[in-house]
C-alpha cells in the first residue's frame, strides 16, 4: 500500500487495530486519507468512532492545501458528495503527485476494500461503494 510516510502507515494501522466491527469500504478509504496528514489526523481523530466519521466536527481552518484536499476527498468518498471535482484533482499545481497517489489508493480502497493490499483486515466489509 502507498503511504505518505511511516507516520501515515502507523496512524492507519493503529486505527484499524482499534476497530471491533465490520466497517464500509468508504470508511476505510476516508480513514486512509485522514491519517495521511499529521495536523489533519490530529484534528480528525476526535471526530472518528469505530463506526462513523463526523466531518462537521473536524476543524478545517488554517489547513494547508494538501491537508484540505485530503479532507474534502475523504468527505466525498464517505458521504457520496462532490466537493472536489476531477479537474481539481488532475491539476498538478494544486494536487501534488504524492497526494494524487494517495487519492488513487483511497479510491481503490473505496471500491475493493483492503483486499490486494498488504493490510488485510477482518473488518473490511463486502460492501461496494
Image (spheres, rainbow, N blue to C red):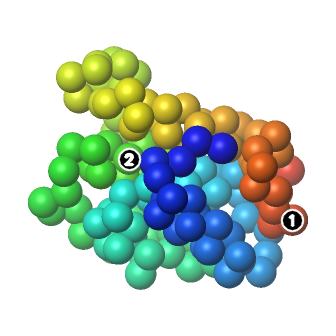
Residue 108 occupies quadrant:
top right
Asked whether 129 or 39 is in front, the reply is: 39
29 or 57: nearer the viewer: 29
Disc 2 from disc 1: Cα separation = 25 Å
Q: Residue 20 location, x and y as percent?
A: 77, 80
- Residue 75 percent across, percent down from the top left: 44, 51
Q: Is the residue 9 above or below the residue 82 in the image?
A: below
Rendered view: 116 above or below 48 = above
Image quadrant holding the N terminus, namely top right
Q: Is 37 left or right of 128, judged from the image as shown?
A: left
- What number is the disc on residue 70? 2
The C terminus sits in image quarter: top right
Indicate the secondary structure of the residue bearing disc 2: helix
**Residue under numbered circle 1:** 122
- Decide if residue 113 is on the left or right side of residue 86: right
Q: Earlier in the sequence, mark 2 or mark 1?
A: 2
Amino acid at each position: 500500500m502507498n503511504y505518505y510516510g511511516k507516520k501515515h502507515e502507523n496512524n492507519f494501522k493503529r486505527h484499524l487495530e482499534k476497530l471491533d466491527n465490520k466497517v464500509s469500504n468508504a470508511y476505510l478509504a476516508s480513514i486512509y486519507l485522514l491519517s495521511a496528514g499529521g495536523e489533519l489526523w490530529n484534528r480528525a481523530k476526535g471526530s472518528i468512532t469505530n463506526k462513523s466519521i463526523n466531518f462537521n466536527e473536524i476543524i478545517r481552518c488554517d489547513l494547508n492545501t494538501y491537508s484540505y484536499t485530503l479532507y474534502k476527498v475523504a468527505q466525498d468518498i464517505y458521504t457520496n458528495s462532490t466537493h472536489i471535482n476531477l479537474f481539481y484533482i488532475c491539476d498538478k499545481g494544486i494536487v501534488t503527485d504524492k497526494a494524487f497517489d494517495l487519492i488513487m489508493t483511497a479510491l481503490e480502497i473505496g471500491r475493493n476494500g483492503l483486499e490486494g493490499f498488504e493490510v488485510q483486515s477482518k473488518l473490511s466489509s463486502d460492501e461496494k461503494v
